[in-house]
Image (cartoon, helix red, strand yellow):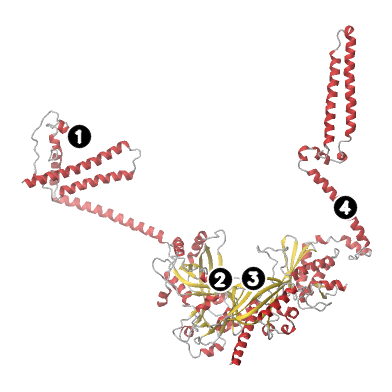
Amino acid sequence: MENTFSVGLKNNIAPQQEYLLQGSIVDLHRDVLLHRLRGLCDNADKQPETFSDHEMVFVLRGATAQQNPVLFRVRRSLDPPDDPSWHIRYLGTSEIGDKNRHTLVRACFDVACSNNVVKFLNEMGFRSDHEYCVKGYFFHKGRMKVTVSKIYRMVQTGTPDGNTQEAMTQSSLVELSVVAPAGQEQIADDMKNFAEQLKPLVQLEKVDQKRLSVQ
Amino acid sequence: MGVVCVYFYPVPEGKSGQQVVDGIQKQIELLGAVKTGNFCVDCETFQAGSGIQNTPQRQVNILHSSEQPASCFAILDTGTCLVADALFDGLMQKLKHYYQQRKGSKIESKGQRYEYGDFIFKVGSVSQASNFKGILVEIEYCPCVVAGDCMNLMKEMSQSLLGSAVAEQQSSFLKTKTDMIYTPADTMSQYLEHFNNFKKATSVNQAMNR
Amino acid sequence: MANQTPNQIEQLHKALKLTQRLRSNVTQVFQKLSDGFEDVEKKDKYLLNDLHKTLSSVNTDLSDLEAGSSTLGPLTAASNSTNSTLICVDPIIDKTSTYTQLIHTYKWTDKMKEQASYASNLLKENQFKRTPIQSGTFTKRLRRSQPACCYPQSNVDVLLNSLIHQYRDTMHISVVRPLGSSAVVMIVLGKTLKALLVLRGMVIEWVKVKGYTEDFHGEDGKVDIWSSSRYQVFQKITQHVTAATLHYYAPEMPDIAIKSLIIWLQSYSTLFSTPCQKCGQFLQNGLPPTWRDLRTKKAYHERCKLMEK
Amino acid sequence: MQKEEKQLESSLADITAKVADIKNALASFLYKLENEFATLNWPTMLDNFALISSNMNSLSRVLRGDKIPALRNFTLFPVLLSPDTDQELAKLTEGRLFMCNHEVVPDYLRTKPETEVEDKINQLHTKANSITSDNAQKQLNNLNKITSNILDIINSYREEWDNDSKQKTQQPQTSSQSETNTLIAAISMGKGLRLQSQMPQQSQQPSPGMQQQSQKPMPVGKMQSSVKTTIRAGSAGHPYPRP
């Protein structure tokens, strides 16, 4: 049987490429940004949607140096706390590209899964690397997705609640992303135009993550 | 979505698999069931290489079912079953340095699907690398969600269809899950159990032939 | 008006024409008489002749008219009914067929009345003694009690809360009131089935049974009391439970009716695990024993139940 | 000698051509001003000015050019003055000048300013000379002072305005590059998110004590058990129900 995934790959309809721009906003001015985003994005008549997620990053390491470690990001929603939805996200290394491309591009698989994923990954040989909580707002305009969120460090591992978290910084992370099938470069232009409209509040840029790790 | 029992139907000496399948299908049609298309359950096995830190070498089985076309069931040899989007196949490819697909390991059960009242019957012939391996009959009782509740009811149905010898088999897996809510993942675990039995049987046969 | 035959209409026309002619003749006579007579001596004979001629024509016209009108008969049979005849006289309303509909309705109500009286006669012969109306004091108390459908909301809530509390181990009962006073009671029985009861006051008006995996909420999140279960078992059980609500119906003690129905409903928790008490089998036509005896609560197949009695 | 004459001749032709250009441009501009003043707009006005000025420029370039002999050295001498109308002249000047007589010649062939103007210049010269150098110095200083004062005022205003506009465009800082980097490093590489105790083991090479640790109730294991219990409760709502 030809499974749906290989059919998707063949017809190039499986969304697997993420186009990304990142920036941040100081908490003091976050409401201004939210207001502007609400005006710019779809569903302006409704209150912005909030989200609250717990992300655990798992890593699979080889014994030898040739095997690159593989990172799986397991995320679950804390928002209805009794019925969380889980998913695994795999992110490839991001390409900065040349000046003609306005956004970061990286491989991206989002796979919804059942709630025993942590046990499953542990048994597969994955080990927990780090974890954090993300809370914030979520907008969309067409297929562009904008999140304005705060990152919380976990003081203790395990189930997160208000007492075991502390905010990383006094800023919220702003991300503009589209997940699309490969080869749709014109999205980057749309995203650039959108990012222009948020200046000078937020500078959404392609941030080289490799450069950050050197610092 | 209800409780499913998967039965192994032995092929008696001197009969071909197709003949037996036809016989069962005739029996089902006599009962008054209606043909509702085809079904397919397939399974691929991935074996861990030696290079994972601090973990015994595990085996991951990836199963797909035509009944849940957008899902993918990943079952470890420890019994843990992860239900995920079909895109999980893509994730397995990202792990190819750690988990390699076994060549010729793909095994599948294919055949007719029938509906009768609240029951669904599936008669599948199992093949691995286009070699016929045996017959699996799946009986699903849709309205019930707890396996323990309808075990005797299922037994009665399977007795009338497949004979008491077959009906007596009960999956060791189902016995452990009598009072929990039944999920499609449990069905996949049953299939995996049977698939593994088929593989074992082949390796034993091969050993004997040598 | 419309239902008169063309022949009658023709005769009506004739009669109208005759009346006109009679009128003109009579006027002629009076005209001549009022004009007066000059030279009576000379022409008296001639004048008398003339007068005689006109009067005789009047006479013939009159007799013609009388003959014509006798064939016409009374105008309409409905003329003796009340104001409704006025509707039929109005030519504009005549087009809207209100009148004919009205007649139909009258016929219907007549028919219904007739059949209802038959039914009541039949029922009288075959009395169910559901409501024990016996001693004098008891009947007095009953007369004061209000009809079961108009119990105040608070009373219903008290009853439902006590039920929720009483059966919290075996079933999960929840109450919503999507449209004001009528309560919709949703019951989840173990992991076997879900049932929905619609109450009007304390009367059970509607019952629906579905599987454990199915939901009584439509796609818009509102309570959906109409859609049936997709499984045959629960469609069948819905029928049985509806029948049982009629059996347990007690207009004078509505709370007992609800309580006993719920106790009876509990026996369905073993729907898939109990074989039929008559034939000892689980399945009959692909269905488990869907009927529970109303008193003993034993499980039977639908057909086995009939044979038992 | 002959060569020089030839040169003169050709350069004269050049000059006449250039002058004719200017004249044409002027004439067309005047024509426009008189006849199309209703529809004339500013850009076309500017175009016309630009045309004239470019013509003037090219004329002066010709005059300054090397090939032109120094015209200053040539003398123009009116040989014949006559009070009679001269048809030829009228034709040459397109009807502007009909005769070459005593009245018009001084105007056309003038090399010095008019006498009245000359007088005025002389007057100013004498006045300038009459002021003493001290006085002149004083006035000069005064003027310098005033101009420097005005300059100061203008500068201070400019600074003020610049500040104002800067504040308007820049606003208070709404985002910080360093915080952006911290956040992105955190979510992409877990920088600053790993717990202190886990950091050395997990991010660097494995220590031999690792095996032991996985048996102890380490934080990851704890999480596992909590998840196990949620499976029982959570499996009621299967995440992928199929109709």
Q: CA distance from mark 4 to mark 2?
A: 67 Å
Q: CA distance from mark 3 to mark 4?
A: 52 Å
Q: Secondary structure at mark 2?
A: strand
- Checking the image for residue D179, the label placed there is none
Output the chain of dot 3: D
Q: Is residue A131 visible?
A: no
Marks 2 & 3 on one chain:
no
| Residue type at the position of mark 2 | Ser
Q: Is residue D121 visible?
A: yes
- Checking the image for residue A52, the label placed there is 2
- Checking the image for residue C113, the label placed there is 4
What residue would you read off at disc 3? D242
Q: Quadrant of residue D30?
A: top left
Q: Secondary structure at mark 3?
A: loop
Residue C132, position as x, y percentages in the image: 91, 66
Q: Secondary structure at mark 1?
A: loop
